[in-house]
Structures are given as structure tokens and as C-alpha cells.
């Protein structure tokens, strides 16, 4: 009966659940289809044997019941002939066969129930096998789509925690810091003695330009000398 338990297990298996946990769903599905095909072959042999056993039990029950009926008739005949001893022996055998018939009938009921269950499991397995063969590509496509949807959901969940504004602010702060460091390094690099003298020369040139601009705007500067009144007084005295 081990094969029947195996058939039940295979027929009740959830193919989608099996594929979800498989490293290689395609290989797993093909293996499952092979297992179902092999199981069907074994199950058919087992079910055929169970049906044969059921028929044999039924035949034994019918034969025992027929013998019980025959000995019942013989007991009646012995009574009619006035032979109680023969009637008693006939009834004894009749009861034995009747009991045997009852045992066979109980076995027949149990065997019939087991056979019907095995036939139902076999039929279910055959239907699942046919469906798996017909829909192999569809099953694999559905599995791939489900996996892709799971990955999309995972990615979406990760992105939901991402704050673009916050990231931009942190990036701006890093850029400002790098610019400040670069500016400081540049100032240190150019703060040399030569640079300071160059700055002094540049300042002197700036002052000269400023003086020229003032002259241009205000006119040349007045030269101070003896006043005209003093000159005339000198001439008069002479």
C-alpha cells in the first residue's frame, strides 16, 4: 500500500508552492511530471490488483453463502426424512459457511472502500499530470511573473524609505565642504613672499592710476609764490 500513500502525496501536492521553493523551477517541474507519470504507471498496476482482490473476495463470499444455503436445504431434507443427526450436522456446516460468508462480506466492504479511494486518487493524479503537461510553460511563466512581482515589491519598499530632498541636501553639503577645502588649499598655495611683493607692486600701480585720475578731473595743481601786491610795493620804493 506504500505506492498508494505516495500517489496521494503527489496528487495532493501544490505545484506552485513546490516551484516557489525550488532553486531551478523548470527542473523541479519536469521532475515532478516524471514522478507523476511513474506514479500513474505503478498506481494502475496496484489498483488493478486491488480490483482483482476485491473480485476474489466477492467470489469467496458468494461461494460460502451458496454452500450455507445448500447445507440449509440438506438440513431441511434430513428433517423431512426423520434423520435429526444428519440435520444437526448439516446445520453445523451451514453455520460455518454462513460465518465464512459474513467474514468475506466484511472484507469485501473494506476492500471495496480502499479500491474506490485508490481509483479516485489515481484519477486525480492523472488529471493533475495531464494539466501539468498541458500547462507546463504557463506554470513556469506564472512562477517567473510572481518572482518578478516579489522583486518589484522589494525594490519599491526599499525606495519608499529613500528621501530625494534629504539626499540632495547631504550632497550639497559635501560639495560645499569640498569647495571650501579647495579654496583654502589654493590660498595657502599662493600665500608666498613673491605673491606679497607682487601685491605691493600692484598696490603702487593702483595709487599712480588714482593720482592721474585726480589730475585729469581737477586740473594741474597750483604753484604757490610771491603775491602781486608785494611786487608792486617793491617797484614803487625803488
Image (tube, rainbow, N blue to C red):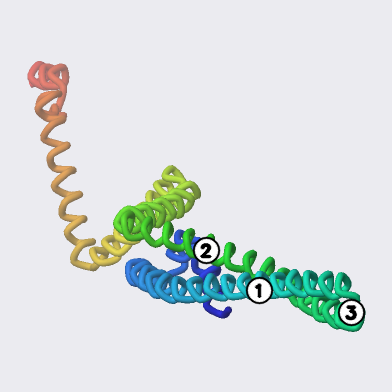
Which is in the foreground here, disc 3 or disc 1? 3
- Which residue occupies 38% across, 55% down? 131
> Is residue 33 toward the left or the right of residue 212 in the image?
right
- Residue 110 marker: none
Residue 23 in view of the camera? no
Q: Earlier in the sequence, mark 3 or mark 2?
A: 3
Label 3 close to label 1 by CB (< 8 Å): no
User: Foreground: 180 or 146?
Assistant: 146
Image location (x, y in percent) of residue 141: 32, 54
> Is residue 111 toward the left or the right of residue 139 in the image?
right
Q: Earlier in the sequence, mark 2 or mark 1?
A: 1
Give residue 9's quadrant in the image: bottom right
User: Callout 1: few (<14), some (14-19), or many (20+) C-alpha neighbours within 10 Å?
Assistant: some
Q: Which residue position holds label 3?
A: 83
- Which residue occupies 40% across, 57% down? 147
How far is disc 3 from disc 1 in space, using C-alphas? 26 Å
Q: Which residue position holds label 1?
A: 63
Image location (x, y in percent) of residue 42: 44, 76
Where 59 falls versus 17 (above or below)? Answer: below
Residue 97 in view of the camera? yes
Q: Secondary structure at mark 2?
A: helix
Q: Which residue position holds label 2?
A: 119
Q: Secondary structure at mark 3?
A: loop
Q: Earlier in the sequence, mark 3 or mark 1?
A: 1
Amino acid at each position: 500500500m506504500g505506492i498508494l500513500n505516495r500517489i496521494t502525496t503527489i496528487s495532493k501536492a501544490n505545484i506552485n508552492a513546490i516551484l516557489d521553493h525550488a532553486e531551478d523551477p523548470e527542473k523541479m517541474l519536469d521532475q515532478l511530471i516524471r514522478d507523476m507519470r511513474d506514479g500513474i504507471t505503478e498506481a494502475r498496476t496496484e489498483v488493478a490488483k486491488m480490483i482483482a482482490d476485491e473480485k476474489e473476495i466477492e467470489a469467496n463470499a458468494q461461494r460460502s453463502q451458496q454452500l450455507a444455503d445448500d447445507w440449509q436445504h440438506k438440513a431441511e431434507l434430513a428433517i423431512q426424512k426423520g434423520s435429526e443427526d444428519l440435520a444437526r450436522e448439516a446445520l453445523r456446516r451451514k453455520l460455518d459457511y454462513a460465518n465464512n460468508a459474513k467474514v468475506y462480506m466484511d472484507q469485501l466492504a473494506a476492500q471495496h472502500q480502499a479500491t474506490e479511494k485508490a481509483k479516485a486518487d489515481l484519477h486525480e493524479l492523472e488529471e493533475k499530470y495531464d494539466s501539468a503537461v498541458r500547462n507546463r510553460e504557463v506554470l513556469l511563466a506564472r512562477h517567473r511573473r510572481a518572482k518578478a512581482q516579489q522583486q518589484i515589491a522589494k525594490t519599491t519598499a526599499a525606495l519608499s524609505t529613500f528621501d530625494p530632498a534629504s539626499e540632495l541636501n547631504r550632497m550639497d553639503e559635501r560639495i560645499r565642504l569640498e569647495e571650501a577645502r579647495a579654496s583654502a588649499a589654493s590660498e595657502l598655495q599662493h600665500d608666498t613672499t613673491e605673491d606679497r611683493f607682487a601685491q605691493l607692486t600692484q598696490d603702487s600701480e593702483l595709487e599712480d592710476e588714482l593720482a592721474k585720475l585726480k589730475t585729469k578731473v581737477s586740473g594741474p595743481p597750483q604753484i604757490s609764490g610771491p603775491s602781486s601786491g608785494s611786487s608792486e610795493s617793491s617797484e614803487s620804493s625803488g
